[in-house]
Structures are given as structure tokens and as C-alpha cells.
Image: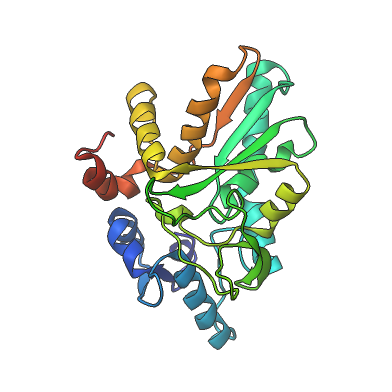
Amino acid sequence: MAAKKFGLKCKIFMGAKDIKRQRPNVEAMRKNNAEIVPVTTGSQTLVDAVSECMRYWVSNCDTTHMCVGSTVGPNIFIKICAWSTAQISRELIKQVKEEFGKIPNKLKLINCVGGGSSAAGFWNEFMDTKAEFIGVEAGGPKNSKLHAAPLSNGSKIGILHGAAQYVIQDKEGQIGSTESISAGLDYPGISPLHCFLKDAKRAKYTSASDEQALKAYQLVSKLENISPSLEPSHAFAEAIKLAPKLKSSEVIIVNSCGDSLKDKDIIKDKLGSYIR
């Protein structure tokens, strides 16, 4: 949409698997004149799309600028994305003060975490407050050993896409396979920003399975006037788990950072129906 606004050509690298499972998103991008470049290497998901995008940029850097829609990759791209997504918390902190008169002493901010962009933006303005940050990674299918949760599954530090980070890898240090119902969370690494927040104990990280995310999607879509995508459904799953244990004075805010329309084909396939 930004490229269309400024009359620029736009290539979007997307894993071939993700093109199929996020068809509505692909159709929307093509309507805005974007060229979708299918990536058929590796797992054909987000990690391979980022790799191919970087290869193209390095080969065409005189005429091309790379935009990364997550806080992954070399330092400058992390900063650009985090600065942009920080608008989320700039708006949120005003809304919180309007609602409660101040920032509550016991405030939990829950966000899904894949690459980590929306969580970085959601938490940014609350860094100097007592707000508790909870990041929820993709735990993958219940009966599978594969997941996309390096922070909450004891992954070691490695190098991926030009940055040191906790990353899923094998004994030889090669990047490992992942699995998640959510295309946006299906990434073997995590932003160095989140690695720092984990090590500094400023944020806590957990995970939700595919099944838990689907149940959360169903409950939230039924009871609230929103229909979250499968990414924030992971965060809602954690909120649903925590809420019954909290006192009435404690406040939970979940960032519903995606709309279910982009996942409607996956949801129909898994649940047999789509709640809008």
C-alpha cells in the first residue's frame, strides 16, 4: 500500500506454503499492484521468504530498498520496524490513562511473538512502568515435536538473517524446522530485542498450541465484537488461562494484532466453519 501511494514498484517475497494458506492476504496485495514472488526453497514459509528477500536486496541494492515487516534481521531494519510499531503503545498508553485515570499498578500486556514486531510496538511506551510483559510463542500442534517457540523451549543462541538470537537449531547449529497453524508466527528465530528482554527478565515468554489458539479464536469471536487472526489467538489463549486466577484489581490487555479474514481458509479447514 505504501509503494502504491508513492508510485513505486513492490515485490513481496512469500513462502509458497503461506501463499496457499493466506490466500485473502495475497489477493489484497495483488489488488494494490504488488508482485508476489513465491519462495519454493526449504520449508516454503516465512524464514525462507526473508532469506530470499535479503538475497534479492543484496543483488539489487543500487535500485532497491528492503522493508522487513518484523523486528528481525540487521540492526537498522529492527530499529525501523520497532519505531513504526511503537505507535501501537503510544495510542494505548493514552487509552489506558483515559480508562483508569493512571497506569494500573498490576497491568499485564499480552502479545503473540513470532518475529516480535507487534509485541515490541505494544510494549514500547510501557518500558519504564511496572507493566508486566507476556509474550506468547507458537507451540505448534499438540502431538508434534515441532514448534516455533525458541524462547520458551530452551533454544540456544545462533545467527539467523544477520542477527544473534535464540533460534531453533540442530546439534550442528543448522536452522531447525518449525510448525505452526499461524503463518505469521512460523519462524525459527526471534527478534534480538526479545532475547534481551528475556535475559533482562523484563518480559516473560510462554507458548500456546495450535489447538489452544483455535479454541481462543472461537471463544473471542463468539463473545467479543472482534474476530482475531490466529496470531493474536495465541495471546488470547494465554489471557484465557490467566484470567480466572487474577484479582479484580488486576488488568489484562491483549493486542489483537490481526484480523481473522486472512486465516479464514485455515480456520474453515480446521473447524469446519468461519466465525466473522
How is the rendered protein coloured? rainbow
Quadrant holding the C terminus: top left
Q: Is residue 235 left or right of residue 155?
A: left
Which residue reaches farthest left? 272
Image location (x, y in percent) of residue 71: 61, 58
From the viewer's side, name the closer residue of 17 and 262: 17
In which quadrant of the rendered view does residue 94 lie?
top right
Image location (x, y in percent) of residue 68: 55, 64
From the viewer's side, name the closer residue of 61 and 274: 274
Question: Is residue 202 positioned above or below 101 on the image?
Answer: below
Query: Residue at point 41% right, 53% down?
Result: 180
Query: Residue at point 52% right, 18% down?
Result: 244
Query: Residue at point 66% right, 40% down?
Result: 204
Question: Is residue 2 positioned above or below 255 on the image?
Answer: below
Question: Is residue 271 positioned above or below 42 on the image?
Answer: above
Query: Residue at point 42% right, 69% down?
Result: 12
Image location (x, y in percent) of residue 18: 35, 62
Q: Exactly how many numbered labels are in the figure? A: 0
In which quadrant of the rendered view does residue 34 lie?
bottom left
From the viewer's side, name the closer residue of 22 and 215: 215
Image location (x, y in percent) of residue 126: 72, 36
Quadrant holding the N terminus: bottom left
Question: Is residue 138 positioned above or below 172 on the image?
Answer: above
Q: Is residue 17 left or right of residue 127?
A: left
